[in-house]
């Protein structure tokens, strides 16, 4: 029996575990893939307070080391259901675990294009966050794939850093707000009705091959980096019975990060929020953990 089970081993989940452990709670962290979450894909991180520069892997290792030092149990498993009222049963592919409260911090995955070598180039030319990685492309050439608000915001930020920015949109028009379109600078070139068909390069990305959907014409763009902005997929499928999900699958939560069911809390990129950064994920983790501790103490199990 655990006081709190944290589902998800990214910055939100590990911070939740840290705060719960510091409150003298018995904690289990369950992660189905890589402890550290999406930040492990970043080769260099410069926007975490207290660190001039470190890799995403280094940051993840420090977080894991910290929660293990504080006494957390960890389990590599996939959660497929949560049941129970006062005592929650978390069912995984490696067994069942019980807890008085659960923090869901499963994050959101970036949508990929599904092209060959895509995984290989993540962190070696493919990025998902201009705020995080844009500075690495100072005075270089980059492409943003997508045409919605997120893609336009990425392009606007990158246009202050890179010498040339391409926006590659599969539709014949941009779907982002007109106001954002008007902010695009002269060094931004919009390529409509086109899809990326291939990544070019050996160990590092050197360009992309694109196809015009109307004419069928194939062309190549020599770029130093590609920023994918084709959407996020929140990892909440297994928790629809304990979370109130919006139409996109993100969890709704109040200021204390309570989920739909009593004793369930939510933190990080899997919830509705405007800003998804490592610092906001950590903030969510702290709030969710302390809210879970207050819940447990008030219930007097």
Image: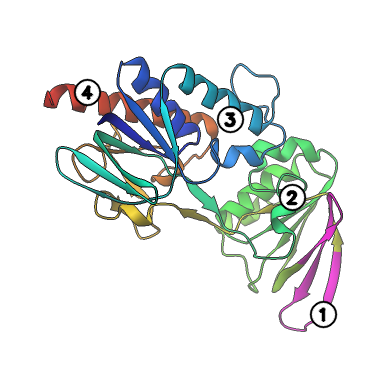
Q: Position of residue 68 (x, y in %)?
A: 47, 22
The residue that disc 3 covers is 60
Q: Is residue 47 visible?
A: no
Q: Secondary structure at mark 3?
A: helix
Query: Along the polypeptide, which appears first: circle 3 or circle 1?
Result: 3
Mark 2 neighbour density, 10 Å: few (under 14) some (14–19) many (20 or more): some
Of all residues, the one furthest to the bottom in this rendering is 215
Q: CA distance from mark 2 to mark 1?
A: 27 Å
Q: Earlier in the sequence, mark 3 or mark 2?
A: 3
| Rendered location of residue 102, percent (x, y) | 29, 37
Q: Does the rendering let one see residue 21? A: yes
x and y, in percent, of residue 198 in the image:
78, 66
Q: Secondary structure at mark 1?
A: loop
Span highlighted in magenta in the image = 198-220
Residue at image mark 2: 185
Q: Nearer the viewer, mark 3 or mark 2?
A: 3
Where is residue 195? Give x, y as percent: 71, 70
Question: Image quarter for residue 189?
Answer: bottom right
Question: Is residue 221 left or right of 11 when viewed as pictured?
Answer: right
At a point 41% along the width and 28% down the height, the residue shown is 73
Residue 93 circle label? none
Q: Alpha carbon of mark 3 to alpha carbon of mark 2: how far? A: 36 Å
In magenta segment, residue 108: no
Of the numbered discs 1 and 4, the one sitting upstream in the chain is 1
* Residue under the image location 77 percent in, 46 percent down: 124
Q: Is label 2 in a helix, a strand or a loop? A: loop
Q: CA distance from mark 3 to mark 4?
A: 27 Å
**Toward the viewer: 21 or 141?**
21
Name the residue tied to disc 1: 217
Q: Earlier in the sequence, mark 3 or mark 4?
A: 3
Q: Is residue 208 magenta?
A: yes
* Residue for badge 4: 294
């Amino acid at each position: 029996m655990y006081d709190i089970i944290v589902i998800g081993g990214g910055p939100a989940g590990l911070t939740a575990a840290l705060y719960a452990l510091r409150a003298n709670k018995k904690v289990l962290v369950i992660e189905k893939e890589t402890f550290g979450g999406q930040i492990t894909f970043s080769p260099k991180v410069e926007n975490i307070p207290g660190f001039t520069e470190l890799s995403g892997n280094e940051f993840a290792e420090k977080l894991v080391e910290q929660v293990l030092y504080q006494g957390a149990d960890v389990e590599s498993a996939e959660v497929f259901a949560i049941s129970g009222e006062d005592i929650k049963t978390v069912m995984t592919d490696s067994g069942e675990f019980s807890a008085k409260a659960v923090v869901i911090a499963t994050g959101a995955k970036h949508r990929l294009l599904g092209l060959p070598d895509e995984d290989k180039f993540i962190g070696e030319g493919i990025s998902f966050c201009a705020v995080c990685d844009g500075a690495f492309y100072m005075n270089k050439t980059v492409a943003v794939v997508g045409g919605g608000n997120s893609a336009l915001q990425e392009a606007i930020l990158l246009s202050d850093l890179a010498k040339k920015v391409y926006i590659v949109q599969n539709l014949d028009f941009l779907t982002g707000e007109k106001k954002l379109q008007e902010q695009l600078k002269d060094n931004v070139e919009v390529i409509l009705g086109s899809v990326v068909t291939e990544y070019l390069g050996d160990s590092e990305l050197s360009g992309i091959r694109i196809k015009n959907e109307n004419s069928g014409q194939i062309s190549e763009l020599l770029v130093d980096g590609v920023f994918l902005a084709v959407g996020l997929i929140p990892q909440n499928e297994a928790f629809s019975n304990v979370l109130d999900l919006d139409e996109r699958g993100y969890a709704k939560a109040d200021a204390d990060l309570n989920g739909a069911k009593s004793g369930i809390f939510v933190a990080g990129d899997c919830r509705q929020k405007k800003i998804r950064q490592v610092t906001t994920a950590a903030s969510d983790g702290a709030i969710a953990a302390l809210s879970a501790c207050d819940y447990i103490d008030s219930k007097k199990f």
